[in-house]
Structures are given as structure tokens and as C-alpha cells.
């Protein structure tokens, strides 16, 4: 009678076979009661003969959890139970192995080490040779089963190890799409459905949100919707008709109608004007024609036939032909080319002429073209005053003609010089003449002073303009107007 000291497995591995290692004591795959002290005796065979293990330096045994498909785990899966035997027995024979008295390697495990959860696990057994470098030889691999005996005890199973597929493993764990019907086995098609891991990876790789104006394009990039829409060419734009655009029209149809409507519009009017001051009037059948600018003093009137507009001399016998409003300092008030043959004489008005210097008086000089007639004896002039005892009068040959005297104070807005003059003899070779009156104030706020003045050219000239200026200082303010009077 013999004693029992531990649970024994006597496992035979055939290195030339891919069959599961088997327990020669019980037959079939190795299995044991969990939480028992365990003794594993290993016999190594090849081609049904005992292996000479004299060149082995060690034999290793490991137990790992199966993968999620119940198949062999990867080499990176956690090891739940492991043993290494470096003391190998090379005296094993077929006879003493069969009698149970010898084994090549012996592994022992405590009850705590074997307390795995019940179920199937993966057993791997390999050897390392004493070559340099050492060689690794798989002796056998397959299932090993852990049984629950239902007994008591304080031994607890180790914490379960959570295992995950790698990305490559997960992408490979697909099932058939086309096979999901009543006639096809799931394994008969190459089409794939992602496993839970692959779905999670897909969700995790979802794009970051874009903006409200963007859309997700086929190349997996966010694009601006408005910019992309505007960049789409109108390929296939039809000829279209100039009908009204309807709410049911497609974009291409609407653009086609719009183009037809634009094409039907009569081209706009061509601009007939060619110079500054030109005007557009209607010619024959309303065709636009150019009406050039008229001359000074002319007005726009209807022609004698009543068929068109034209510039004509004013029908009035009294026409303003020149005007100047002085708002900033200026040396001269010049009216060049103002006298024409359209008028026999002119009336000059000046109002509140002012300068920055007291004891100054306005003067006039005639012009022939751009030439100012200002010789020392160009004029025969005279002036007189009323309501003043002392003033700068004028008489005899002069280079200008006074329009007032220096007793008028032209520096105050209440004292500016105003007056009227009559000019004649300008439209032909003649001696131009001027005669007039002026008024002002001898002192600021004082009584009014009146002047009469006049004069004429010493020689015969064709006069077409004049200029006014102060005897001392610049103009600072005033209004000047010249009116033409037709020959009566």
C-alpha cells in the first residue's frame, strides 16, 4: 500500500506531433483539481521513441489563459503558472516510463499556485539546448483543464487577467457580411464585420468637429461649404430662355434663364461727349448726340425750327457775364476776356470790398488779352468826394483809376467799399471809359462817405477785360459782378 502526497499528472509530449499533450494516467488532455498540490512528470518522445535529453539545458512549462476565441494565446499573454526544470534525467527508457518509475523532467506546484479559475487553459512546453547560442525547441502545446472540486478551503483564485487584442489581431477578427443569411456559413466569405475592438477604434478615430459653415469631404477633411459651392463650375449649363426664374428650377436652369434675360437686354447708350462742358441731347429718333459747351453769356434755347436745343445769345438786353465772390486773401480780382462784341457797354457792381490795411482804396486797370494796361499815363482820371474834407483825389494822367478815396476804412465789415460803374468803348479799337460812384465810411461806425470817379484810356486799345486791386494790401472779402448791356 502507498501514500498519497500530491496530485500527479504524467504527461507525454511527442515533439514530432502537433497533437495535444496527453495524460498517460487518465488518458486525454491533462486536467487537475484546482487548489491542489500538483506534481507533473514529463516524458519526451519523438517518432514513438524516448528522446536523448543530454543536450538539453532546461525544459520550461507555462500555463496561460486562452484568447477571446478560445484559441492559443499570443506569446505576450500573461503567464498564470510556470515551472522550469534544469535537472533532466537521461536514463528514461520506454520500460521505466511505462512503469511510472522515471521521467525526463519533474515540475511541482503548491495549492496556492494551482488555484486558477475552473476552465480550459493553454499549456506550452519547450526545451533549450546547451548549444552556443542556445536553441529553443517546442516539445508540445495544447489544452489543459482546471476542475472545480467544490471543496472548502481558504485558497482563492488569483485575480483574473484582462486580455486585449492588438490592433492587428482585432482587425483580423471579422465575420462575414454576405454570410449572414440562411444559406451561407459565416466562415465562407471574405467580407468582414468589425469586432467590438475594431468598432471602438473606428469611433475613437472619428474626426474632430468642424464649424457650422463646413462639411466633411470624402478625403476626410473639413471644407468651407460656401467656398466649395462657389468654386463648382457650371458644367452642363443649358442655353435657356428668358422666362422668369421659378422656385422649382435647378441651379443650372435658373442661371440659364438669367443669362438669357441678360442677353435679351438692348446694349446701353454709348457716350457721345468728348470734352468738358459737353451735354447729351436727343438727335434723330432720339439717338444721343453731343452738344458742345457754348460761349460766355449764352443760354440754352430751342432753335428756330423747334427741333433741337442749341446755345444762343441771351434774348435779354442785360446779362450777367462775370461774377466773383472773394472769401480769401487775393491780390487781384481779374476778369479776362469778359468784353465781347455781343454787348455795347457794361455795368460793374462791387459790394463790401475789404482789405487788411486802412487808408487804402480800390483801383481798376483795363486789359488787352493778358496784357495789363498800367503805364504811368495810361489813363486820364478824376475823383471827388462828398461828406469828407480830406481825401486822396485823382486828376490827370495816371496808371490806374481810383474807385474811391483813402478816407474810407476798408478793414471793417461795416465799412467795406461798395459802388457801381458804367464801362463803355470796349468792343472795338477805341478809348475805353468808366464812370461811377462808390460809398463807404470814413471811420468805423462813422458817417457815410460818397465818391464819384471816372476816367478813360489815353490811347486807343481793343479792351477785353479788366482787373481790380487795392492800392495797399490784398483783398480779404467782397463781391464783384459784371453785366453786359446789348447795343440798343
Image: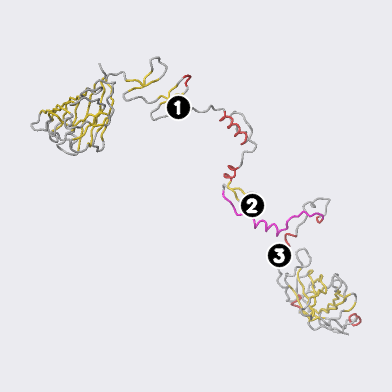
- Measuring 61% from the left and 48% from the top, which residue is drawn there? 215
Q: Nearer the viewer, mark 3 or mark 2?
A: 2
| SS at mark 3 in the image | loop
From the viewer's perspective, is residue 167 above or below residue 346?
A: below
Tell me the distance, in whole angstroms, between the alpha carbons under discs 2 and 1. 59 Å
Residues in magenta, as a range: 188-211
Whether 284 is drawn above or below 438: the answer is above
Give the residue number, with chain letter if any, for mark 3: 164
Q: Which-is-in-front pick, marks 3 and 1? A: 1
Circle nearer the N terminus (2, 1): 2
- Give x and y (percent) for residue 366: 22, 29
Is 18 situated above or below 217? below
Q: CA distance from mark 3 to mark 2?
A: 29 Å
Which label belongs to residue 220? 2
Residue 272, which numbered label? 1
* Depth order, front residue of 81/277: 277
Colour scheme employed for the rendering of this structure? secondary structure
Mark 1 crowdedness (10 Å alpha carbons): few <14, some 14-19, many ≥20 = some
Indicate the position of residue 101 as horizontal and vertical percent values.
88, 83
* Image spot of residue 344 (x, y percent): 25, 20
Amino acid at each position: 500500500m502507498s501514500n498519497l502526497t500530491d496530485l500527479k499528472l504524467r504527461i507525454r509530449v511527442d515533439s514530432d506531433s502537433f497533437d495535444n499533450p496527453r495524460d498517460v494516467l487518465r488518458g486525454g488532455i491533462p486536467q487537475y483539481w484546482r487548489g491542489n498540490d500538483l506534481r507533473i512528470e514529463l516524458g519526451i518522445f519523438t517518432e514513438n521513441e524516448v528522446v536523448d535529453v543530454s543536450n538539453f539545458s532546461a525544459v520550461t512549462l507555462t500555463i496561460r489563459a486562452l484568447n477571446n476565441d478560445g484559441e492559443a494565446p499570443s506569446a505576450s499573454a500573461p503567464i498564470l503558472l510556470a515551472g522550469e526544470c534544469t535537472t533532466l534525467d537521461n536514463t528514461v527508457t520506454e520500460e521505466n516510463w511505462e512503469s511510472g518509475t522515471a521521467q525526463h523532467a519533474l515540475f511541482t506546484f503548491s495549492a496556492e499556485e494551482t488555484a486558477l479559475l475552473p476552465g480550459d487553459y493553454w499549456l506550452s512546453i519547450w526545451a533549450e539546448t546547451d548549444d552556443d547560442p542556445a536553441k529553443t525547441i517546442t516539445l508540445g502545446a495544447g489544452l489543459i483543464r482546471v476542475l472545480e472540486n467544490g471543496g472548502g478551503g481558504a485558497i482563492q483564485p488569483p485575480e483574473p487577467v484582462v486580455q486585449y487584442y492588438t490592433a492587428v489581431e482585432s482587425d483580423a477578427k471579422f465575420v462575414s457580411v454576405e454570410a449572414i443569411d440562411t444559406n451561407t456559413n459565416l466562415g465562407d466569405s471574405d467580407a468582414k464585420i468589425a469586432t467590438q475592438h475594431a468598432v471602438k477604434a473606428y469611433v475613437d478615430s472619428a474626426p474632430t468637429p468642424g464649424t457650422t459653415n463646413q462639411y466633411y469631404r470624402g478625403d476626410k477633411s473639413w471644407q468651407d461649404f460656401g467656398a466649395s459651392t462657389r468654386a463648382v463650375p457650371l458644367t452642363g449649363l443649358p442655353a435657356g430662355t428668358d422666362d422668369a426664374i421659378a422656385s422649382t428650377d435647378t441651379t443650372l436652369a435658373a442661371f440659364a434663364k438669367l443669362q438669357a434675360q441678360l442677353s435679351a437686354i438692348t446694349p446701353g447708350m454709348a457716350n457721345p461727349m468728348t470734352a468738358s462742358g459737353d451735354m447729351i441731347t436727343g438727335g434723330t429718333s432720339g439717338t444721343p448726340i453731343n452738344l458742345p459747351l457754348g460761349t460766355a453769356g449764352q443760354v440754352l434755347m430751342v432753335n428756330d425750327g423747334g427741333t433741337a436745343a442749341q446755345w444762343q445769345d441771351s434774348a435779354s438786353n442785360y446779362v450777367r457775364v462775370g461774377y466773383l465772390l472773394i472769401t480769401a486773401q487775393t491780390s487781384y480780382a481779374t476778369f479776362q476776356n469778359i468784353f465781347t462784341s455781343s454787348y455795347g457797354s457794361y455795368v460793374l457792381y462791387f459790394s463790401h470790398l475789404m482789405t487788411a490795411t486802412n487808408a487804402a482804396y480800390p483801383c481798376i486797370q483795363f486789359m488787352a488779352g493778358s496784357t495789363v494796361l498800367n503805364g504811368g499815363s495810361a489813363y486820364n482820371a478824376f475823383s471827388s468826394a462828398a461828406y469828407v474834407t480830406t481825401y486822396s483825389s485823382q486828376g490827370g494822367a495816371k496808371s490806374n483809376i481810383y474807385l474811391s478815396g483813402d478816407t474810407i476804412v476798408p478793414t471793417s465789415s461795416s465799412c467795406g467799399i461798395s459802388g457801381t460803374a458804367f464801362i463803355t468803348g470796349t468792343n472795338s479799337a477805341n478809348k475805353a471809359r468808366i464812370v461811377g460812384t462808390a460809398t463807404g465810411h470814413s471811420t468805423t461806425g462813422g458817417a457815410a462817405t460818397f465818391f464819384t470817379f471816372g476816367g478813360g484810356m489815353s490811347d486807343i486799345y481793343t479792351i477785353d477785360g479788366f482787373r481790380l486791386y487795392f492800392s495797399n494790401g490784398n483783398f480779404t472779402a467782397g463781391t464783384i459782378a459784371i453785366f453786359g448791356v446789348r447795343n440798343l
